Amino acid sequence: QVQLVESGGGSVESGGSLRLSCVASLRTRGNYCIGWFRQGPGKEREGVAVVDANGSPSYADSVKGRFTISRDNDKNTLYLQMNALSPEDTAMYYCAADLSAPPGTCAWYSEHYSGTGGALGAWGQGTLVVVFS
């Protein structure tokens, strides 16, 4: 069973930065996708940034150049460094994983995921990010 626990959310002024953390207990072989997803007020859930088992990242167009996904395998922790935040980034941020993803498919989550489809079988409880102007 996979457990994902997020932390690091908060309130920040526009232009500021936050770093989210997700402690992930993953016990799996083969490829998988793990990443960050968000759902803003009145919006569909969307993919933000995802990495595959090899650590290859992919990003939604809206966050490219501002957000960086990384992981520390020794600490079983996934990070999302968010810079140049804007009020449009206000959302509940979730860590989620697809443990059965074929190789080369993780980018779909950051580029196309909108709340349905895929096989994200594990979700954290979420951490709230509020960006005020």
Image (cartoon, rainbow, N blue to C red):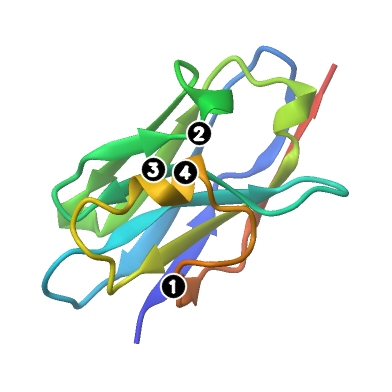
SS of the residue at dot 4?
helix
Residues tagged 3 and 1 counted as in contact (Cβ below 8 A): no
What numbered label is drawn on residue 21? none
Residues tagged 2 and 4 counted as in contact (Cβ below 8 A): yes
Q: CA distance from mark 3 to mark 4?
A: 15 Å
The earlier-in-sequence mark between 1 and 4 is 4
Q: Residue placed at 64% from the left, 61% from the top?
A: 115
Residues tagged 3 and 2 counted as in contact (Cβ below 8 A): no
Specify the amino acid type for callout 4: Ser
The earlier-in-sequence mark between 3 and 4 is 3
The earlier-in-sequence mark between 3 and 2 is 2
Choose mark 3 or mark 2, whichever is in front.
2
SS of the residue at dot 1?
loop
Name the residue tied to disc 4.
Answer: 110
What numbered label is drawn on residue 119? 1
Q: Position of residue 62 (x, y in %)?
A: 58, 25
Q: In which quadrant is the C terminus drawn?
A: top right
Name the residue furthest bottom.
Answer: 1
The earlier-in-sequence mark between 3 and 1 is 3
Specify the amino acid type for callout 1: Ala
What numbered label is drawn on residue 79? 3
Residues tagged 2 and 1 counted as in contact (Cβ below 8 A): no
Q: CA distance from mark 3 to mark 2?
A: 16 Å
Label 3 neighbourhood size at 10 Å, few (<14), some (14-19), many (20+)? many
Specify the amino acid type for callout 3: Tyr
Closer to the camera, 102 or 39?
102
Q: CA distance from mark 2 to mark 4?
A: 5 Å
